[in-house]
């Protein structure tokens, strides 16, 4: 004999489990499609013009927090988590960072797979290779819950290229 309630409950459980997995799993390009266009684009490692070391600390700071680059420059950011907590560096517009932060507060175990961001466990290092295509300011922040509110933010000043 079939049990319609059991089948319905099983279907609901499967849907709930799938939704939970999406909420806490990886996400890529889930925040507006071409949102990266406003801040640049993934760089080609072989074309990077310089390397900038960035350290993240449990004092909720980046060092350096203010970086200057030239429009068109491809930069390799060597990012080190010098703290005991998980930290990340996400490049974006202020609006994108704030929207993403709200999502992170609801899903703190979310991992990232986009080229403009890196999440690092305590003591770990990684890199972002990024080309800054437009003059202006590009913000960066740690979007782990509480970190952004504590001031873990920085900015890249992109100086207009004379070749443009």
Image (cartoon, rainbow, N blue to C red):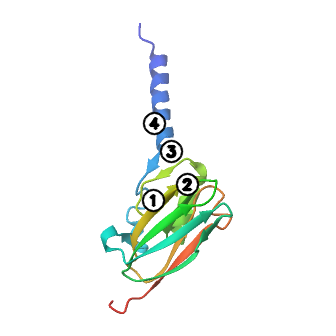
- Lower position in the chain sequence, tag 2 or tag 1: 1
Q: Element type at marker 2?
A: helix
The answer to whether mark 2 and mark 1 are in CB contact below 8 A is yes
The answer to whether mark 4 and mark 3 are in CB contact below 8 A is no
Quarter the N terminus occupies:
top left
Q: Which mark is residue 106?
A: none
- Rendered location of residue 148, percent (x, y): 63, 63
- Rendered location of residue 112, percent (x, y): 46, 54
| Residue at 43% over, 56% down | 30
* Residue ID for mark 3: 23
* Residue ID for mark 4: 18
Q: Element type at marker 4?
A: helix
- Compared across the picture, whether 3 is left or right of 148 comes to left
Q: Hey, which quadrant is residue 132 in on the image?
A: bottom left
Viewer-nearest residue: 94 or 69: 69
- Rendered location of residue 156, percent (x, y): 51, 77
Near mark 1 (Cα within 10 A), the count class, few <14, some 14-19 or many ≥20, is some
Establish if 117 lies above or below 130. above
Q: Is residue 44 visible?
A: no
Near mark 3 (Cα within 10 A), the count class, few <14, some 14-19 or many ≥20, is some
Viewer-nearest residue: 118 or 106: 118
Q: Hey, which quadrant is residue 143 in on the image?
A: bottom right
* Residue ID for mark 2: 103
Q: How far apart are labels 1 and 4 at the CA level?
A: 20 Å
Quarter the C terminus occupies:
bottom left
| Residue at 37% over, 70% down | 41
* Residue ID for mark 1: 31
| Residue at 49% over, 68% down | 91
């Amino acid at each position: 004999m079939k049990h319609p309630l059991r089948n319905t409950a099983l279907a609901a459980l499967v849907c709930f489990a799938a939704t939970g997995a999406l909420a806490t799993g990886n996400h890529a390009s889930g925040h507006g499609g071409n949102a990266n266009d406003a801040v640049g684009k993934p760089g080609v490692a072989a074309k990077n013009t310089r390397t900038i070391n960035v350290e993240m600390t449990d004092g909720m700071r980046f060092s350096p927090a203010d970086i200057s680059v030239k429009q068109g420059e491809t930069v390799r950011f060597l990012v080190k988590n010098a703290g005991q907590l998980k930290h990340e560096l996400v490049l974006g517009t202020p609006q994108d960072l704030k929207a993403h932060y709200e999502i992170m507060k609801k899903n703190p175990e979310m991992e990232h797979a986009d080229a403009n961001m890196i999440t690092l466990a305590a003591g770990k290092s990684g890199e972002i290779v990024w080309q800054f295509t437009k003059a202006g300011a590009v913000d960066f922040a740690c979007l782990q819950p509480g970190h952004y509110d504590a001031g873990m933010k920085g900015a890249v000043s992109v100086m207009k290229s004379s070749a443009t």
